Image: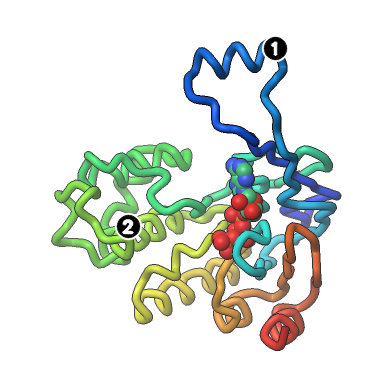
């Protein structure tokens, strides 16, 4: 049991979608108190269960809107499940929303320390890894530039280099690789594979089935919030490709 790093048990997530537009905060408050705001219920995930063991790697595949990012957010603790439970064992380095840990007015150098602090890494540790981050991201000439001037590829390089320092127990990668160029993607894949080799558990979302097959041992196919198939990345990838 101690080898189980992520235990997702019968998780469902409901979003309340406001049916009408409310034009002001005052109107919103009045209508909330009166209970006259109407919502449509939307279940983004329904009855999801799986476990990932230490050093395991799970790829999530599915069409746009099938619930992949929502599931990652529940595991990262950003969202609470409406039903069911999620147990996570260890530290998580989440790469979920591009630029989420950055202040766009600060330079790349300043953001290394800011993002590190958000991930729970000490300043001393960030100083130790600073050169590695600059090297890996290949942004040596841009470290004093405010990140608002960065391209999405540059942002993802920096975010990936920061999140993968040290040895997080769990690494969550949501499509950040898709904005990098091919050569950088390969470099990231190699780093993820190394981390898996030294017992980091990886959750990986990609629209590239090839990438999922290459990086992940297992895969979960989500379809409109439901588990459509769970198995080895090879099996699931092959079925998904012909669907
Ligand atoms: N905060 C929210 N409020 C309301 N609905 C939401 C919210 N977040 C996500 N959704 C809805 O939940 C569904 C699943 O979204 P999610 O982003 O998890 O899909 P995805 O599989 O990651 O898609 P993509 O491949 O496009 O990234 C979508 O229909 C989306 O509109």
Taking the spot 81% from the left edge, 52% from the top edge, the residue there is 46
The percent coordinates of residue 80 (x first, y second) are: 69, 37
Vertically, is 188 above or below 124? below
Identify the image quadrant of the C terminus. Answer: bottom right
Give the Cα separation between the discs numbered 2 and 1.
45 Å
The percent coordinates of residue 81 (x first, y second) are: 74, 40
The residue tagged 2 is 155
Taking the spot 49% from the left edge, 24% from the top edge, the residue there is 23
Q: Is residue 146 left or right of residue 154?
A: left
Who is closer to the viewer here, 149 or 223? 223
The residue tagged 1 is 34
Neighbourhood count class around disc 2 (C-alpha, 10 Å): few under 14, some 14–19, many 20 upward: many
Is residue 200 among what the camera can see?
no
Vertically, is 235 above or below 184? below
Vertically, is 158 above or below 124? below
Contact, mark 2 vs mark 1 (Cβ under 8 Å): no
Who is closer to the viewer here, 95 or 119? 95
Query: Dot 2 lies on which element?
Result: helix
- Of the two numbered discs 2 and 1 on the same chain, state the one appearing first in sequence: 1
**Residue 185 location, quadrant:** bottom left
The percent coordinates of residue 62 (x first, y second) are: 66, 69
Disc 2 residue: CB within 8 Å of ligand 1:
no
Point out the frontmost of discs 2 and 1: 1
Colour mode of the rendering: rainbow
């Amino acid at each position: 049991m101690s080898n189980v790093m992520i235990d997702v048990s019968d998780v469902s997530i409901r979003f309340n979608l406001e049916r009408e537009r409310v034009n002001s905060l005052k109107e919103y408050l009045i209508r909330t108190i009166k209970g006259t705001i109407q919502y449509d219920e939307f279940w983004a995930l329904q009855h999801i269960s799986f476990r990932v063991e230490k050093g395991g790697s799970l790829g999530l595949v599915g069409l746009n809107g099938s619930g992949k990012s929502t599931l990652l957010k529940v595991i990262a603790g950003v969202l609470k499940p409406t039903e069911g439970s999620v147990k996570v064992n260890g530290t998580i380095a989440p790469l979920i929303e591009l630029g989420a840990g950055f202040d766009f007015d600060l330079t790349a150098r300043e953001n290394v320390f800011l993002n590190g602090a958000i991930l729970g890494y000490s300043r001393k540790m960030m100083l130790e890894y600073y050169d590695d981050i600059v090297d890996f991201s290949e942004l040596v000439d841009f470290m004093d530039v405010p990140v608002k001037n960065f391209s999405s590829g540059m942002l993802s390089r920096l975010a990936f280099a920061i999140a993968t320092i040290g040895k997080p127990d769990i690494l969550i990668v949501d499509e950040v690789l898709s904005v990098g160029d091919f050569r950088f993607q390969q470099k990231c894949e190699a780093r993820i594979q190394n981390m898996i080799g030294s017992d980091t558990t990886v959750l990986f979302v990609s629209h590239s089935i090839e990438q999922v097959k290459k990086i992940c041992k297992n895969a979960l196919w989500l379809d409109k919030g439901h588990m459509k198939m769970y198995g080895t990345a090879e099996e699931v990838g092959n079925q998904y490709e012909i669907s």
